[in-house]
């Protein structure tokens, strides 16, 4: 395996880490925007109890964690392979 391949794996790891962080921040923004929009309504039950659950609000968060885990694993693998050569 050449050094260029190690750098490519390391680069993909960093890309996935940044993508995961962006997804987690986007999830926080979407959730905040959604629940702030509920404050303007008369019925505040959904705002207070968060019932019913909205799965699409957690989709960005779950995708972010998955991307972050994959990115960390790729970065570690690329770093180890680069150090081994």
Image (cartoon, rainbow, N blue to C red):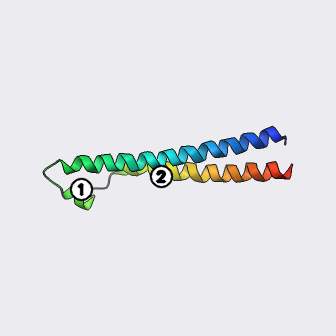
Mark 2, residues whose alpha carbon is within 10 Å: few (<14), some, or many (≥20)?
A: some
Q: Position of residue 81 (x, y in %)?
A: 80, 50
Tell me if mark 1 has few (under 14), some (14-19) or many (20+) residues whose alpha carbon lies within 10 angstroms of its own: some
Vertical side of 79 occupied by 4: above or below: above
**Residue 50, percent across and down?**
28, 58
Specify whether 2 is left or right of 51: right
Above or below — where is 26 with respect to 45? above
Does residue 37 appear left or right of residue 25 in this picture?
left
Q: CA distance from mark 1 to mark 2?
A: 22 Å
Mark nearer the N terminus (1 vs 2):
1
Tell me if I can see residue 56 in this picture. Answer: no
Determine if residue 5 is in view: yes
Q: Position of residue 27 (x, y in %)?
A: 42, 48
Q: Which residue is mark 2?
A: 62
Quarter of the image with the N terminus in it:
top right
Question: Which SS class for mark 1?
Answer: helix
Q: Residue at x 14, y 53 (%)?
A: 43
Determine the residue positioned at 40% across, 50% down. 28
Of circles 1 and 2, the one toward us is 1
- The numbered dot on residue 2 is none
Query: Residue 47, which numbered label?
Result: 1
Q: Position of residue 75 (x, y in %)?
A: 69, 50
């Amino acid at each position: 395996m050449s050094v260029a391949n190690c750098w490519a794996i390391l680069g993909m790891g960093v890309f996935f880490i940044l993508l995961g962080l962006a997804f987690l921040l986007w999830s926080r923004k979407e959730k905040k925007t959604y629940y702030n929009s509920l404050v303007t309504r008369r019925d505040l039950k959904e705002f207070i109890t968060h019932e019913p659950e909205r799965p699409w609000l957690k989709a960005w968060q779950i995708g972010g964690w998955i991307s972050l885990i994959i990115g960390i694993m790729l970065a570690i693998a690329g770093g180890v392979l680069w150090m081994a050569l």
